[in-house]
Amino acid sequence: GKEYEAEVTVAKCLEDSKRWFDVIAISKEGEGGRNRMDEGKKRWKAPEAESLKCNIGISWMQRNHLAGMGWIVRNRNGETVLHSRRAFNGVSSLLEAKRLGLIWAVESM
């Protein structure tokens, strides 16, 4: 197995939990229910028929220069088609984290 730094593990856990809450929110939308955690937040909008939609998420911790990022591709029904996550160490700014995240997401698809 692989060994990870504590910050990397936390970043992965946060991304996984965010994805889990996103999936729950999407399934509740289909049931007509509402999730209190999502009130006041932008909601995910489905792509047009026969299309896929990719969302990219990036976080950066200034204190330790660690960036975590992930991307997810979903179909019209909100079902996950592909996803991935990664952490970068030594990232000096949020702008650099966004640049690295976008490049990495495109290259990894």
Image: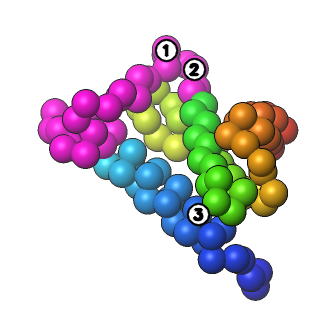
The reply to whether dot 2 and dot 1 touch (C-beta < 8 Å) is yes
> Residue drawn at (62%, 55%), measured in percent from left and top?
61
Residue 65 falls left or right of residue 7 = right
Residue visible at 76% across and 81% down in the picture: 2
- Closer-to-camera residue (13/59): 59
Q: Nearer the viewer, mark 3 or mark 2?
A: 3
* Amino acid, disc 2: Ser
Could you say where residue 62 lies in the image, as x and y percent from the top left?
Answer: 65, 53
Q: Secondary structure at mark 2?
A: loop
Choose mark 3 or mark 1, whichever is in front. 3
Residue 84 vs residue 74: left or right? right
Cα distance, mark 3 to mark 2?
28 Å
Q: Which residue is mark 3?
A: 12
Residue at the spot x=47%, y=40% of the render?
79
The residue that mark 2 highlights is 51
Instruction: Give x and y (percent) for residue 31.
Output: 19, 38
Quarter occupied by residue 90: bottom right
Question: The residue under label 1 is which amino acid type?
Answer: Glu
**Disc 1 designates what residue?**
48
User: Are circles 3 and 2 on residues that touch, CB within 8 Å?
Assistant: no
Residue 10 higher or lower than 27, as above or below: below
Tell me which segment is drawn in magenta. 25-53
Between 8 and 72, which is closer to the camera in this rendering?
8
Quarter of the image with the C terminus is top right
Q: Reply yes or no: does residue 44 show up in magenta.
A: yes
The quarter of the picture where the N terminus appears is bottom right
